[in-house]
Image (tube, rainbow, N blue to C red):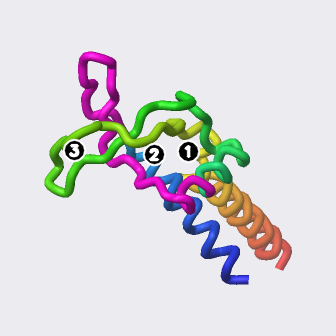
Amino acid sequence: MFEGWKREREVRQVLRRLGRQHVGLILQPGNVWVIEQALMHDEKTDTILLTCLMRGWVEVLEQSLPRGKLTAEGNLPPGPMFDSVAPIYRVTDSGWNAINRAHEWTLIGVLIAVASLLATVFLATG
C-alpha cells in the first residue's frame, strides 16, 4: 500500500525537478545547450520519465541530444565533452497541473462548496 504512495511521490519529485530546469547558455560552435539544474539520469530516473511520458505529463522536445557532465569543481571534463545521447523532455500543461495539484484543489473546492450548501440548508430548515 505504501509502496504505491512512495512511487508516486518519487514521480512527482522528478517532475518538479524537470520543471526547474532551464537553459543557462548556448555554447558555440554547435549550438550546445547548457542546462542548469539538470536531472541526474540513472535507470530509475529514466523509468520515471517514461512513466510521465505515458501519463502525458512530459513530451520529448528533442530525441537524441549529446549529454555530458561537468567535473566536481564545475569545469568542463578533460577529453571528450559528451559521453552519451539522450532525449530531452519538456513538461506539458497536464504535467504542470500535476505539479501544482490542480485537480486536488478543484476537488477540495467542490467539497467545501457542497458542505457549505448542506450546512446552509440544514440551518435554514432547523
Could one spot residue 90 in this view of the protein?
Answer: no
Element class at badge 1: helix
Residue 41 relative to residue 54: left or right: left
* Mark 2 crowdedness (10 Å alpha carbons): few <14, some 14-19, many ≥20: some
Q: Amino acid at mark 1?
A: Trp
Q: Amino acid at mark 2?
A: Gly
Tags 1 and 2 touching, CB below 8 Å: yes
* Mark 1 crowdedness (10 Å alpha carbons): few <14, some 14-19, many ≥20: some
Q: Which residue is mark 1?
A: 96
Count the marks: how many? 3
- The numbered dot on residue 19 is 2
In the depicted view, which residue is nearer to us: 77 or 97?
77
On whether residue 24 falls in the magenta region, the answer is yes
Nearer to us: label 3 or label 1: 3
What span is colored magenta in the figure? 22-47
In the depicted view, which residue is nearer to us: 116 or 70?
70
The residue at 48%/37% (across/down) is: 85
Q: Quadrant of residue 104?
A: bottom right
Q: Quadrant of the C terminus?
A: bottom right
Q: Earlier in the sequence, mark 3 or mark 2?
A: 2
Query: Label 1 vs label 2: CA separation?
Result: 8 Å
> Percent from the top left, x then y, of residue 109?
66, 59
- The numbered dot on residue 87 is none
Image height of 111 relative to 5, above or below: above
Image height of 82 relative to 29, above or below: below
Question: Which residue occupies the extreme front position in the image?
Answer: 79
Residue 114 relative to residue 40: left or right: right
Q: Which residue is mark 3?
A: 77
Question: Which residue occupies the extreme bottom position in the image?
Answer: 1
